[in-house]
């Protein structure tokens, strides 16, 4: 089987039709073993990291053992429902269900015997009405279409006194067709007008500004403007791929290789020679430039950068990032134990409980819930929701506040012994689960604008209003991570040197002036008071490439609850929730799944060889058919396995896409690339009935 990188792979299958091995042309082998009943018993990757499953006589998972030999253990009731989980660090969770099988409470017991309890209340339809823990209560309201119309947070006395939690309500409005028309939150309201396809054409921001989008016939973005000022215009090729974007006085061009992978980027100044279709401009005269060279596994091997020189990436046989070498800074090496924990050196022993004891010279401490509490000179405090609420560092302390949806809406830093006046404060406004605006004390409001196809890739930010308004343009790499920022006249005002796991080593712009640029890996916001990256539902420590608390969705996010990704150049986690898919995980698509439906899908483009990009699907580690089918209103669902898609030369990206039609976050959204329409039809057909009741189908906001 030839992959997109022209590599030939070979697969073997057992007598039950289950994949048993995958051999790459390099000779490395990935293998699967099964029980006599066909249940997965073990998976061994190309680096001999083995994950093992044990089952009860009834076929339910009783234990899951990671590569270090540490176990998750599971208990079920007489009806086969999961009622208890014990993690490798000793933390346990007990699930209390009612007679209908709905979850009514989760009791978490820490490693020192402490207990956190969350209760849940539902209506007769199974809709969540209320959750409550020791620090706060959240209530949910719905309309007749089962869309959430309001979420209300009411802190308890303990939440107010211990964590400064504040009452908050987020409300949503919809039109008769179910399109989201407004979101009202504590820091203001956002209102939407849409075209016939549901694309947002006019967005009214909380400060009264209007963000407008112009599309052409097939629904692809042509122009973005703010209060009548054109921010960017786009030019696309016949496959609707972006090949040029205006960025103030600059024009940024992009080119692709035969497999549809990004091959080069150039930002040209005014007066540069016209760029002809398919032409790669020379680097001379470019403000920014990058060339990408991909290996046979579809991984970035080298980036030749006009500012940073050549940067070379290396990987192990399973695709884990193992090295990054550049011309400007020392060579970075990355080492892992067999559970995927990033280590300081090759000789360091395994982290059996996944709680990394330190990184470099920094020592880490944790509370009994697995949340980081000491780092450098910092003391971190958390509420019962698992949210970071205060960091004490030297003579200062910073407080963090969140809205009813769990989005961070404010942070303020105080002197520890100088009263209650904040030294600095920042307020945040969100569009769904994406940062829209921030108001930094004494700096004013900044509005962020994003790429239409890559919803967490920034295009520009705008500060000020009227004659004082300024537009700043972001130049990003293949992952969507900002590398440079230019002013409207093309002047370079910021340039980072981003290491392999997102840490910015330096500002190399030589601009001589400070520029506020907190955006890092997709969906991440750099907090200068701690050095951590805020990642929506968690915080991320870039120096060790991992989250500082356990995944709130548990094993649904992957077997290592602190892991970000084995390769941040290929994978991203804008919500702080996802991990990677296993070969046995399923991918779902709604509808008839005919070749024409794939070819003509919204946002889908085809290359010269007929390979499609932008196929919209649903996927999630360990998720079942019903979970993945819920967002689809179709009566039929197409299902394919990860292994079969990759065997056919396709790739799957978990991207948690924002649903522009109703403002919800499609948390399980995944984009499939690299298949022809005919291959996609063969993989996803025959379809099967949607198992979700009709009245419960359709996108819902995850809270």
Image: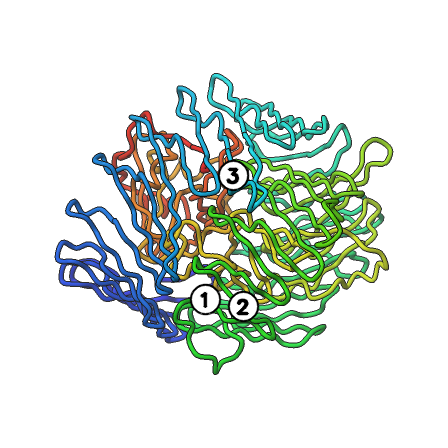
Name the residue beneath numbered marker 3: 157
Q: Dot 2 surroundings within 10 Å: few (below 14), some, or many (20 or more)?
A: some
Badge 2 marks a residue whose secondary structure is strand
* Picture disc at residue 364: 2
> Where is residue 448 shown, x and y percent of the image?
68, 41
Camera-side mark, 3 or 1: 3
Q: Who's the residue at 39% across and 53% down the image?
A: 554
- 615 vs 123: above or below: below
Please give the count of numbered marks on the rendered protein.
3
Spatial CA distance of label 3 from label 1 is 31 Å
Name the residue beneath numbered marker 1: 355
- 183 vs 68: above or below: above
Of residue 640 and residue 185, the one placed in the foreground of this image is 185
> Where is residue 587 shown, x and y percent of the image?
35, 47
Circles 2 and 1, Cβ within 8 Å, touching? The answer is yes
- 100 vs 349: above or below: above
Of residue 93 and residue 28, the one placed in the foreground of this image is 93
Circles 3 and 1, Cβ within 8 Å, touching? The answer is no
Q: Dot 3 surroundings within 10 Å: few (below 14), some, or many (20 or more)?
A: some
Of residue 241 and residue 288, the one placed in the foreground of this image is 288
Q: Who's the residue at 56% across and 57% down the image?
A: 540
Q: Dot 1 surroundings within 10 Å: few (below 14), some, or many (20 or more)?
A: many
């Amino acid at each position: 089987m030839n992959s997109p990188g022209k590599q030939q792979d070979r697969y073997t299958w057992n007598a039950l039709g289950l994949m048993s091995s995958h051999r790459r042309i390099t000779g490395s082998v990935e293998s699967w073993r099964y029980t006599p009943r066909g249940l997965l018993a073990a998976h061994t990757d190309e680096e001999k990291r083995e994950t093992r499953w044990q089952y009860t006589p009834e076929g339910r998972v009783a234990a899951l053992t990671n590569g270090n030999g540490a176990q998750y253990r599971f208990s079920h009731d007489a009806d086969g429902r999961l009622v208890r989980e014990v993690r490798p660090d000793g933390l346990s969770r007990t699930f209390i269900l009612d007679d209908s099988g709905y979850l009514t409470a989760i009791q978490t017991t820490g490693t020192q015997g402490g207990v956190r309890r969350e209760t849940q209340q539902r209506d007769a339809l199974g809709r969540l009405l209320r959750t409550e823990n020791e620090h706060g209560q959240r209530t949910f309201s719905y309309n007749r279409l089962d869309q959430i119309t309001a979420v209300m947070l009411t802190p308890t006395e303990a939440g107010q006194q211990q964590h400064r939690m504040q009452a908050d309500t987020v409300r949503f409005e919809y039109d008769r067709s179910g399109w989201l028309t407004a979101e009202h939150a504590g820091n203001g309201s956002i209102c939407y007008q849409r075209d016939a396809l549901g694309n947002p054409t006019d967005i009214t921001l909380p400060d009264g500004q209007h963000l407008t989008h112009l599309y052409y016939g097939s629904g692809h973005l042509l122009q973005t403007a703010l209060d009548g000022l054109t921010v960017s215009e786009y030019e696309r090729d016949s496959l609707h791929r972006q090949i040029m974007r205006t960025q103030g006085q600059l024009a940024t061009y992009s080119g692709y290789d035969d497999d549809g992978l990004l091959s080069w980027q150039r930002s040209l100044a005014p007066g540069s020679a016209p760029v002809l279709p398919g032409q790669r401009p020379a680097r001379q005269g470019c403000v920014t430039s990058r060339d990408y060279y991909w290996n046979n596994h579809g991984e970035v091997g080298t980036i030749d950068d006009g500012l940073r020189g050549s940067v070379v990436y290396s990987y192990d046989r399973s695709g884990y990032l193992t090295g990054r070498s550049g011309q400007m800074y020392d060579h970075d090496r990355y080492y892992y134990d067999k559970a995927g924990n990033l280590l300081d050196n090759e000789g360091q022993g395994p982290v059996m409980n996944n709680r990394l004891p330190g990184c470099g010279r920094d020592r880490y401490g944790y509370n009994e819930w697995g949340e980081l509490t000491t780092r450098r000179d910092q003391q971190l405090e958390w509420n019962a929701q698992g949210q970071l609420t205060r960091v004490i560092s030297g003579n200062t302390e910073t407080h963090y506040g969140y809205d009813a949806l769990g989005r961070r809406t404010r942070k303020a830093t105080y002197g520890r012994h100088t009263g209650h006046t904040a030294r600095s404060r920042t307020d945040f406004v969100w569009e769904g689960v994406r940062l829209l605006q921030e108001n930094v004390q004494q700096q004013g409001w900044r509005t962020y604008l994003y790429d239409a196809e890559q919803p967490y890739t920034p295009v520009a930010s705008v500060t000020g209003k009227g004659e004082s308004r300024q537009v700043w343009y972001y130049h990003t790499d293949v992952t969507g991570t900002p590398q440079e920022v230019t002013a409207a006249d093309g002047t370079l005002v910021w340039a980072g040197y981003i290491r392999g796991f997102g840490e910015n080593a330096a500002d190399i712009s030589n601009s001589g002036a400070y520029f506020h640029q907190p955006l890092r890996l997709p969906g991440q916001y750099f907090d200068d008071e701690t050095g951590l990256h805020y990642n929506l539902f968690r915080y991320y420590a870039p120096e060790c490439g991992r989250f500082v608390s356990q995944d709130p969705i548990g094993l649904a996010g992957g077997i290592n609850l602190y892991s970000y990704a084995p390769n941040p150049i290929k994978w991203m986690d804008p919500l702080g929730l996802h991990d990677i898919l296993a070969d046995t995980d399923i991918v779902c698509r709604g509808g008839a799944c005919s070749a024409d439906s794939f070819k003509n899908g919204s946002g889908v483009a085809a290359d010269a060889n007929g390979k499609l990009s932008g196929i919209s699907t649903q996927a999630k580690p360990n998720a079942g058919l019903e979970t993945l089918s819920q967002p689809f209103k179709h009566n039929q669902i197409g299902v394919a396995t990860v292994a079969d898609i990759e065997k056919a030369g396709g790739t799957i990206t978990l991207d948690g896409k924002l649903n522009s039609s109703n403002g919800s976050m499609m948390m399980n959204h995944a984009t499939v690339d690299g298949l022809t329409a005919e291959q996609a039809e063969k993989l996803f057909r025959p379809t099967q009935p949607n198992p979700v009741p009709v009245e419960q189908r359709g996108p819902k906001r995850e809270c």
